[in-house]
């Protein structure tokens, strides 16, 4: 891995479209169903996400983590409230505009790597940019694949790569388009502890060395302790908002 100062001075990334917080969310309410079956999945959540910060969203099952992550990333609507992503209001935005905003500003990392088996690692990484008819910045491509230790693996197909290497390809594919924010839903959920730790190393490096902003839902307290900030949800509300918490501290709060 490169040192922080090398990467930062070479190529300060990502190229953001907006100053100030990446996300400003106010009074988010999400209600599913109605009457007796009504569930308030989000019950008045307000938060700001600052650039180059790594935030973990934690909480018991059903506390609203996925609902919050999906709302903030523009994947799902809310019942009321306001979400500014890169200064633009998502609530009430037309589908087409929302899809465009998501494509240009949000990078997704899910449990499944979703790599195309017939393509090499390099082609998998470049595929979304090519589909969007965008030019891949080769210097940036080299920087991120170097940082992720993929330089020697770029001509391999997914079945010739370990689980951790496949996840790194998936992360590189997300980073290559320079999203304002990376959203990760249980990125270590399917992985053994060693590979899970590797994925956390990668996300940490994306924040520390590339200035990327990361928002991650997780049940994994060990992973969450490596974030800069933990938001703990209970019954659709933020019960704790804590910086640099240890695994033990987080354990006591959930
Ligand atoms: N499509 C839906 N229709 C009805 N209720 C829903 C729907 N999606 C989520 N819910 C409810 O909203 C609440 C919050 O769900 P959410 O999936 O956000 O929780 P979570 O914290 O991510 O849970 P988990 O850790 O189990 O993934 C839960 O009570 C859930 O049952």
Image: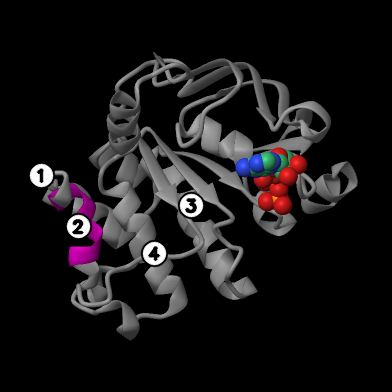
Other-residue count near label 3 (Cα within 10 Å), few / some / many at <14 / 14–19 / ≥20:
many
Which tag, 3 or 2, sits closer to the chain's start? Answer: 2
Q: Secondary structure at mark 2?
A: helix
The reply to whether the magenta stretch includes residue 125 is yes
Write down the residue under mark 1: 133
The quadrant of the image that shows the C terminus is top right
Write down the residue under mark 4: 168
Please report the bounds of the magenta region as a residue range.
123-130
Write down the residue under mark 2: 127
Is 131 situated left or right of 162 in this image?
Answer: left
Which tag, 4 or 2, sits closer to the chain's start? Answer: 2
Label 3, label 2: how far apart the Cα atoms are: 21 Å
Q: Secondary structure at mark 4?
A: helix
Tell me the residue at 42%/47% (across/down).
108
Q: Residue 189: x percent and y percent?
A: 61, 64
Label 4, label 2: how far apart the Cα atoms are: 15 Å
């Amino acid at each position: 891995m490169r040192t922080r100062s090398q990467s930062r001075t070479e190529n300060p990334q990502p190229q953001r479209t907006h100053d100030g917080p990446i996300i400003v969310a106010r009074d988010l309410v999400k209600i599913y169903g109605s009457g007796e079956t009504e569930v308030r999945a989000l019950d008045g959540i307000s938060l700001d996400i600052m650039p180059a910060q790594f935030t973990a969203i934690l909480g018991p099952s059903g506390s609203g983590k996925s609902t919050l992550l999906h709302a903030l990333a523009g994947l799902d609507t809310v019942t009321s409230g306001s979400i500014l992503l890169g200064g633009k209001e998502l609530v009430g935005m037309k589908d087409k505009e929302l899809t465009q905003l998501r494509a240009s500003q949000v990078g997704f990392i899910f449990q499944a790597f979703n790599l195309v088996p017939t393509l090499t690692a390099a082609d998998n990484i470049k595929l979304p940019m090519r589909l969007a008819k965008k030019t891949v910045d080769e210097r940036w491509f080299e920087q991120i694949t170097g940082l992720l230790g993929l330089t020697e693996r770029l001509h391999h197909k997914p079945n010739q790569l370990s689980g951790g290497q496949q996840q790194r390809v998936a992360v590189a594919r997300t980073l290559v388009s320079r999203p304002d924010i990376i959203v990760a839903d249980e990125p270590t959920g399917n992985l053994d502890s060693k590979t899970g730790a590797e994925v956390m190393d990668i996300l940490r490096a994306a924040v520390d060395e590339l200035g990327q902003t990361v928002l991650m839902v997780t049940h994994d307290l060990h992973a969450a302790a490596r974030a800069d900030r933990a938001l703990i949800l209970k019954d659709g509300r933020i019960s704790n908002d804590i910086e640099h918490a240890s695994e033990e501290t987080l354990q006591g709060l959930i």
